[in-house]
Image (cartoon, grey):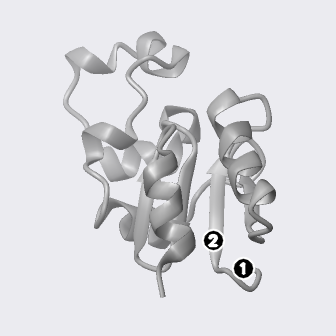
Amino acid sequence: MGTSGIQIFGRKKCRDTQKAERFFRDRGISYQFVDLQIKPMSPGELKSVLRTIETDALIDSQSAEYRQRAMQWMEYDPLEELARQPALIRTPVVRRGSDATVGHDPDGWLRLATAP
């Protein structure tokens, strides 16, 4: 995880993911980038993130995957769907230990960077 313990889960082409990487890089804070298109979050990582972030905030209801599957009209298990379909995850998810943020959240990133 690097010395800071910060992980950024995102996609290379996501502008908010790029902003998160730049935020930490500009401050000289090491992080581990995990490209969700290559390696999805493990069930354990998802459960850890969902302790801090509401499920509705983690699901990207603006994503093509969400619209194609018409998820607004169906009953589903969010943990199962997010584990199976990483394209549904709003990015970036920035995590340090048991704390996490989702989306463009510079205040949250600063909190994670400065936490003891």
Q: Nearer the viewer, residue 59 or 68?
A: 59
Q: Describe residue 114's horizontal placement relative to residue 19 as left or right.
A: left
Indicate the position of residue 33 as horizontal and vertical percent values: 75, 58
> What residue is drawn where x is 33% and y is 60%?
50
Identified by mark 1, the residue type is: Met
Counting residues from the N terminus, which is met first, the one under dot 1 or under dot 2? 1
Neighbourhood count class around disc 1 (C-alpha, 10 Å): few under 14, some 14–19, many 20 upward: few
Amino acid on which disc 2 is placed: Ile
Q: In the displayed structure, would residue 74 be above or below residue 42?
A: above
Residue at image position (69%, 30%) is 14
Position of the N terminus, as image quadrant, is bottom right
Residue at horizontal 45%, vertical 66%?
Answer: 111
Say which residue label 2 marks: 6
Q: Residues within 10 Å of mark 2 (few under 14, many from 20)?
A: many
Q: Position of residue 68 (x, y in %)?
A: 47, 11
Q: Is residue 36 above or below residue 109?
A: above
Image depth: mark 1 or mark 2 in front? 2
- The residue identified by callout 1 is 1
Q: Nearer the viewer, residue 29 or 13?
A: 29
Most distant residue in the front direction = 27
- Answer whether labels 1 and 2 touch (C-beta < 8 Å): yes
Report the Cα–Cα distance between label 1 and label 2.
Answer: 7 Å
